[in-house]
Image: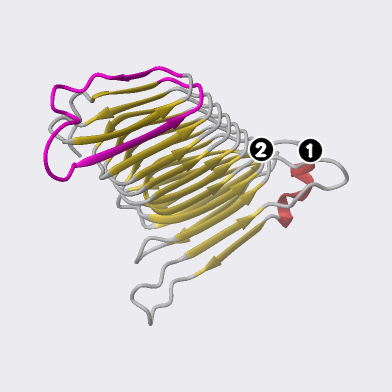
Amino acid sequence: MSVRQHHISAAGPPPWIEVRNPAGSVTVEAVEGANLLDVRVEPLNAAAEQLLEVVEVEVSDADPDQVDSPTRLRIAVPERRLMRTPEFAVRITTPAGATARVAVASADVELRGRFARTELTGASGNLTVDEATDLELRTASGSARAGTVHDRASIGAASGNIRLGRVDGALKVRTASGDVSVEHVTGATSIKTATGDVTVAAAAGEAVQVKTASGNVSVGVVPGLHVWLDLASASGRMTSDLDEGGADFGGRPDLTVTLRSASGDLRIGRAGAVPAV
C-alpha cells in the first residue's frame, strides 16, 4: 500500500498537534532536542487506500514576528464511506513538550515521551500517554493509562479501566463500571464510580474523596501525614491499618479521606515508600 510522508520544520516553541482518526492507530513520539515534525500516514485496508490522498494534513508555520508562536499541525482522516470504515496508522515524531489533541473512535492512541497540555477522546480504542503537563481524557469502553501528569488530570470513562501513575495536581475521575488505579497523587482527588474497584496506592494531597456503589476501595496514606477519616458503607466492611494516632490528633489534618460505598469494602492503610520525582 502507498504511504504519505511529510517532514516539517518545527524550530522555536514546541508545536501544537491535532489528529482526528476514527479507526486504526495514532502514535505520537516526543523526542528531546528534535526540531522536526515527521508525519507518516499509512492505510491499513482497501477503503483507506482509496482515501489516502484526501487525508487532510495542514501545517501553519510559526509566525516569525511572534516569539511564542508554535508550528501547528492538523491531520484529519475521512469518515466512513459507502458503509466501509477506512483504517489508517498515523505516526508522528515531534519535539518534546508539544501540545496534543487526539480524537478517535476505535483507534488505539499512544503518546510516547513528554507532552504539554494533552486531550484524548476515544470510544473503544485504548488510550496511553507517558507524560503530560495536564491531561483531559474521555473514553467509552477503551482502557486508559497515563504515566505522569505534572498538573491537573480530568478523566471520564464508561466501562474502560483507568490506570494512572503519578498526578501532581488535582485529579478528577468519573467512570461507571471500570476499575480505577492511581499509584501516587499529591493534589485534591475526587473519584466516582458505580461498580468499579478503586485503588489509590499513595495519597498525599489535602483531600481524597471516593464514591462507589458496589466497588471496593483501597487508599494508602503517605507516611507522616495526620489523617481525618470519614468512612461510610451500607453493607461492606471498613478496615483501617493506620498506625496509632493516624486518625486521632489535635489540630488540622494534613489529609482528609472521605469514602462512600453501598456494598463495597473500604480499606485505609499506610503507603509504602514513595519514589522521589
Residue under the image location 70 percent in, 40 percent down = 87
| Local crowd size for mark 1, using a 10 Å CA cut-off: few (<14), some (14–19), many (≥20) | some
| Label 2 secondary element | loop
| Label 1 secondary element | helix
Residue 220 appears in the picture as rendered = yes
Residue under label 1: 46
| Local crowd size for mark 2, using a 10 Å CA cut-off: few (<14), some (14–19), many (≥20) | some
Q: Earlier in the sequence, mark 2 or mark 1?
A: 1
Does residue 133 belong to the magenta stretch? no
Specify the quadrant that holds the C terminus.
top left
Say which quarter of the image contains residue 171.
Answer: top left
Left or right placement of residue 173 versus residue 159 in this view: left
Specify the quadrant that holds the N terminus.
top right
Say which quarter of the image contains residue 251.
Answer: top left
**Eyeballing the image, is 156 above or below 96?**
above
Residue under the image location 39 percent in, 78 percent down = 64
Q: Amino acid at mark 1?
A: Ala
Q: Which of the two marks, 2 or 1, is nearer to us in this view? A: 2
In the image, which disc is placed on residue 251?
Answer: none
Residue under the image location 53 percent in, 29 percent down = 213
Q: Which residues are magenta?
A: 236-265
Left or right placement of residue 46 versus residue 7 in this view: right
Residue 146 appears in the picture as rendered = no
Q: Amino acid at mark 2?
A: Ser
Across and down, in percent, residue 176 comes to 58, 34
Residue under label 2: 106
Across and down, in percent, residue 90 comes to 58, 45
Q: Nearer the viewer, residue 140 or 193?
A: 193
Say which quarter of the image contains residue 249.
Answer: top left
Q: Nearer the viewer, residue 24 or 198?
A: 198
Residue under the image location 17 percent in, 29 percent down = 246
Label 2 and label 1: CA atoms lie apart by 17 Å
